[in-house]
Amino acid sequence: MNKRATAQFWLEFTTDISCLALGNIFTYILFHVIFNKIQDYPFTEWVEYIVNIALSFIVVFVIFHSNIDIHKRNRLKEFSSVLKNVSLTYAMFITLMILTKNELLDSRYTFIFSYIFTVIFSSFGRYHLKRKITGSFTKSAAASIAGVIVTEDQAEEFVKGINEDWSLRISGIALLGDPSPLSGGGLATKAKAICDIPVVADETNYMDWIRSSPLDEVFVNLPYNNNDEIAEIVEELENMGITVHVNLPIIYKMVNESKFNNLNCKMFSGYPMATFTAAAPDPRWMAVKRVFDIFFGIVGCILSAPIILITAIPLLAESPGPLFFKQQRVGKNGRLFNIYKLRSMYVDAQERKAALMAQNKMNGLMFKMDEDPRITKVGKFIRKYSIDELPQFINVLKGDMSLIGTRPPTVDEFEHYESRHKRRLSMRPGITGMWQVSGRSDINDFEKVVELDCQYIDNWSPMLDLKIFFKTIYVVLTHKGAE
């Protein structure tokens, strides 16, 4: 299941279950509150009613959900799908009500009219979803940011087709071939656009554009004589953790050379494309991971509030200034966001960093030193117990970060990355991760941090997250690797 199919699954799930709830609520208000046709039943019977109908809906939806793109289903097919799903849901629901001997079985109004209203609301809900999904999803943070590399003779047709995919937001186009059609006969500028999407690069600078832009996917549609060049593009983008779609006629060279071997084929914009990706976790499990993040993000914010308030008193008494430290970090595939922490350093810490660079004990792009004079006494304490990280639960709720993931680099670090380093950003960064539970302050080699992050990405599973979660608790309690 690709990202578009996963998004459609959850959007339809949310729409249908909302319409089911609305149909039942409307029935209750109409026939119990207004017309008094439904007698009073014990509260436990209503709870059992809700559990039975919710369980029936989930089972039927998961088994019988249509994977056909919502835009390819006409009104008749959409109504048939709604009618089938609602009918099967109510058939299973009534069966469960009989097996549990629920008293509401006596209320014919409840079953007949809630069924009718659910069909009506679901039909309108699907119609509304189809109308709104294209523009709304494309503009949302959930959409995949895509780039296109194509020759000018195929650009308009290819980009037009790709742009119809409502799960993608194309941020720019690189036109390869003769650069003369572009402004001044040299580098591309945003003055030229195809299907209202800016042409931002040509054959002289397209890789610079890719390296400096937040991209989740890149579509490559080039002629046969570019095989060697395309092979290099695929290899570098795979190393960066970016998903690459390549038109099929020229993949024979890359199929046996790709070290990742996550290859699948699909039609895009009428062209057969091969997709190479460095890591391909199941989108359904990633959706579960996000639900996990939201739940623990809420719990974390609630539990952190009193700790932060207590910490604020000595922290501000020792070093007057803002309570929170906000810094721009680089997230998934180059997206920028503001990370939040409790301030553990003096307010002029950033200005003093340059003078301390000679004492950096990290081999590579990260900065860390023993007895950093910029850290306050309270700062040392809250770092030891990871209290300074608590505000990051806000980042988790916003979707900038995950509870468990890779370490988000600073903008300065990111600007010095090689392409292979960027693969560690192919998943959402986390509050904790492999580096943190492997003795973060005992690891002085940046390449080791990259290795641990890539190890996490390549081997990701819900069980790995669970293992890191419990190991984090142990590390925090024992202060292992903390400074």
Image: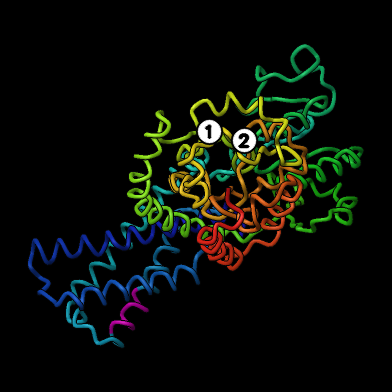
The residue that mark 2 highlights is: 410
Where's the N terminus, which quadrant? bottom right
Classed neighbour count for the residue bearing mark 2: other residues with Cα under 10 Å, few (<14), some (14–19), many (≥20): some
Distance, label 1 to label 2, CA atoms, is 8 Å
The region drawn magenta spans 90-97
Residue 475 among magenta residues: no
The residue that mark 1 highlights is: 327
Count of numbered circles in the view: 2
Coordinates of residue 359 in the picture (x, y in percent) = 70, 34
Which residue appears at 25% of the width and 65% of the height? 24
Ranked by sequence position, the earlier of labels 1 and 2 is 1
Amino acid at the residue labelled 1: Gln
Any part of residue 152 in sight:
no
Coordinates of residue 225 in the picture (x, y in percent) = 92, 38
Coordinates of residue 349 in the picture (x, y in percent) = 55, 29
| Residue 434 or residue 231, whichever sits in front | 434
Classed neighbour count for the residue bearing mark 1: other residues with Cα under 10 Å, few (<14), some (14–19), many (≥20): few
Q: Is residue 171 above or below residue 228?
A: above
Residue 334 in the figure: left or right of residue 99: right
Q: Are marks 1 and 2 in contact (CB under 8 Å)?
A: yes
Residue 148 in the figure: left or right of residue 312: right
Which residue appears at 8% of the width and 64% of the height? 35
Q: Is residue 119 above or below residue 353?
A: below
| Residue 103 or residue 272, whichever sits in front | 103
Q: Under tag 2, what secondary structure?
A: loop
Which residue appears at 34% of the width and 74% of the height? 90
Residue 94 among magenta residues: yes
Q: Is residue 203 above or below residue 478?
A: above
Q: Residue 60: which numbered mark, if any? A: none
